[in-house]
């Protein structure tokens, strides 16, 4: 197997289970700035996301993942409120 192909395969432990990256723990400072930026605009262009990530000490993927999570939660919350007649 070539090196390129072995890099594409998921890493496994001695029992054959996939090794997962540890969950990102966001600081209150990071969460505050991510929330503030999300309230300004829900969709960040690549340069904006790179700038925000650099300023918070996060990767662009961590910023993107957090914003996607927030959008999903807000969508579920809106569906719940509509379903139960709160909106």
Image (spheres, helix red, strand yellow):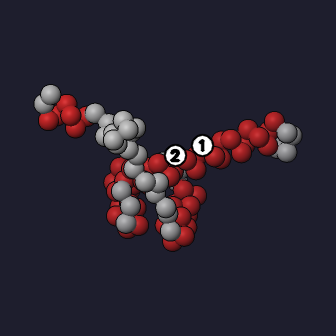
Compared with residue 40, is residue 64 higher up or lower down, i.e. above or below? above
Q: Secondary structure at mark 1?
A: helix
Residue 17 in the figure: left or right of residue 5 = right
Q: Compared with residue 77, is residue 35 higher up or lower down, i.e. above or below? A: below
Circle 1 Cα neighbour tier, 10 Å, few/some/many (<14 / 14–19 / ≥20): few
Query: Residue 55, percent across and down?
Result: 38, 67
Considering depth in this image, is 2 or 68 the residue closer to the camera? 2
Local crowd at mark 2 within 10 Å, few (<14), some, or many (≥20)? some
Instruction: Check the image and name the residue furthest to the left.
Output: 2
Name the one closer to the observer, 45 or 75: 75
Q: What percent of the width, then of the height, locates residue 26?
A: 49, 63
Closer to us: 16 or 53 = 16
Kindly identify the residue that appears in the image at 47 percent across and 48 percent down: 65
Q: CA distance from mark 2 to mark 1?
A: 6 Å
As drawn, the residue found furthest toward the top would be 1
Number of numbered discs on residues: 2
Query: Residue 44 at what x, y percent from top left?
Result: 44, 51
Q: Which residue is mark 2?
A: 68
Disc 2 secondary structure class: helix
Q: Position of residue 24 (x, y in %)?
A: 46, 57
Q: Which mark is residue 72?
A: 1
- Does the CB distance between marks 2 and 1 fall below 8 Å? yes
């Amino acid at each position: 197997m070539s090196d390129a192909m072995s890099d594409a395969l998921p890493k496994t432990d001695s029992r054959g289970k996939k090794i997962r990256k540890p969950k990102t723990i966001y600081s209150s400072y990071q969460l505050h700035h991510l929330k503030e930026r999300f309230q300004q605009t829900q969709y960040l262009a690549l340069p904006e996301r790179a700038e925000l990530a650099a300023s918070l000490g996060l990767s662009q993927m961590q910023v993107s993942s957090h914003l996607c999570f927030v959008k999903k939660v807000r969508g579920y919350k809106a569906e719940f409120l509509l379903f139960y007649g709160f909106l």
